[in-house]
Amino acid sequence: MDAAPARWFLYLLECRNGSYYAGISTDVQARFAAHLAGKGARYTRANPPLRVLASREFPDRASASRAEWQLKQLPRHRKLAFLADPAQPAA
């Protein structure tokens, strides 16, 4: 029996200094907990996250990574809209 393919998520965190941090994971809540525990990215160790602002599901890691790159190119005020609207192109 084949296991179902992992779903990947692009997520956006709000950090204590007011900045945003974007990343990808198969389990957003577990990844957020890792960031909180200081076991996430170097950026979130220096700028601890406060909350998950939004996330968006993708069928595979490659499409989630492309969407992460695209999100990081957007101005701050468009990042939440990008994650909230599944009709927006992701790659």
Image (cartoon, rainbow, N blue to C red):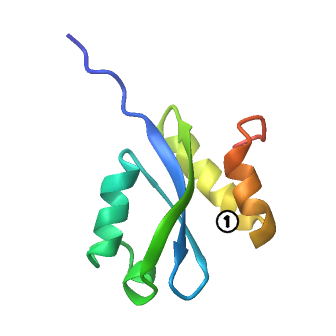
Point 61% across, 83% down: residue: 18
Per the image, label 1 sits on a secondary structure element best described as: helix
Point 46% across, 74% down: residue: 50
Image location (x, y in percent) of residue 84? 69, 46
Characterize the local packing of mark 1: few (<14), some (14-19) or many (20 or more) Cα atoms within 10 angstroms: some
Residue in front for this viewpoint, 53 or 82: 53
Point out the image quarter for the N terminus.
Answer: top left
46 versus 41 height, above or below? below
Image location (x, y in percent) of residue 91? 70, 44
- Asked whether the viewer can see residue 75, the reply is no
Image location (x, y in percent) of residue 48? 42, 82
Point 45% across, 82% down: residue: 43
Point 73% across, 51% down: residue: 82
Viewed as shown, does residue 25 lie left or right of 84? left
Viewed as shown, does residue 30 lie left or right of 51? left
Q: Residue furthest front?
A: 51
Image location (x, y in percent) of residue 73? 74, 65
Q: Residue furthest top?
A: 1
Q: Which amino acid type is marked by label 1?
A: Lys
Disc 1: which residue: 72
What is the count of numbered marks?
1
- Asked whether the viewer can see residue 86, the reply is yes
Where residue 44 sits, quadrant-wise, is bottom left
